[in-house]
Image (cartoon, rainbow, N blue to C red):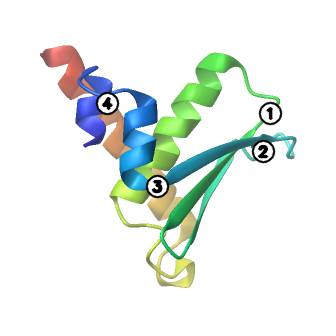
Amino acid sequence: MLIALLKGEITQDDYMRANNINIFYRYMPSYIHGLVIKYRDISMIVINKCLSKAKADLTILHEFAHLELNHVEKFICEYKRADIEDEADKYVEFLLNTVKGC
């Protein structure tokens, strides 16, 4: 479904409604761009309020990738945090390259 968002087939609001996602902007340390928390069936994405619009948009996409890859469902201790961050980054890169190729 994330590919449909990137292709412009659905809006970000549509994607968020379909996946029960809320986005919040908060001031956080500069090394934290964003994070996602899931509670019951609601996913909450928190984006660092200090980010530029372009960086915030990319961070939101990265957090969406975590949700699509079910990283939030897994225990973080099962995986090295760097591994799941790399996997989300690679997934976003793959999606963006797929959309460019269309």
Q: Which residue is mark 4?
A: 5
Could you say where residue 34 lies in the image, as x and y percent from the top left?
A: 67, 46
Q: Which residue is mark 2?
A: 31
Horizontally, residue 61 falls left or right of residue 47, namely left
Q: CA distance from mark 2 to mark 4?
A: 27 Å
Which label's residue is closer to the chain start, 1 or 4? 4
Type of residue at label 2? Answer: Tyr
Labels 4, 3: front one: 3
* Residue 87 in view, yes or no: no
For label 1, the SS is loop
Instruction: Point out the residue furthest to the left here.
Output: 102
Q: Which residue is mark 3?
A: 20
Could you say where residue 73 lies in the image, as x and y percent from the top left?
A: 44, 75
Q: CA distance from mark 3 to mark 1?
A: 22 Å
Q: CA distance from mark 2 to mark 1?
A: 12 Å
Compared with 82, 13 (above or below) is: above
| Label 4: few (<14), some (14–19) or many (≥20) C-alpha neighbours in 10 Å | some
Horizontally, residue 15 falls left or right of residue 60, namely left
Q: Residue at x 42, y 57 (%)?
A: 67
Type of residue at label 3? Answer: Asn
Type of residue at label 1? Answer: Lys
| Label 2: few (<14), some (14–19) or many (≥20) C-alpha neighbours in 10 Å | few
Labels 3, 1: front one: 3
Assess whether mark 1 and mark 3 are in contact (beta carbons under 8 angstroms): no
Which quadrant of the rendered structure holds the N terminus? top left
Nearest to the observer: residue 24 or residue 79: 24
Labels 1, 4: front one: 4
Compared with 72, 91 (above or below) is: above
Q: CA distance from mark 4 to mark 3?
A: 15 Å
Labelled disc at residue 49: 1
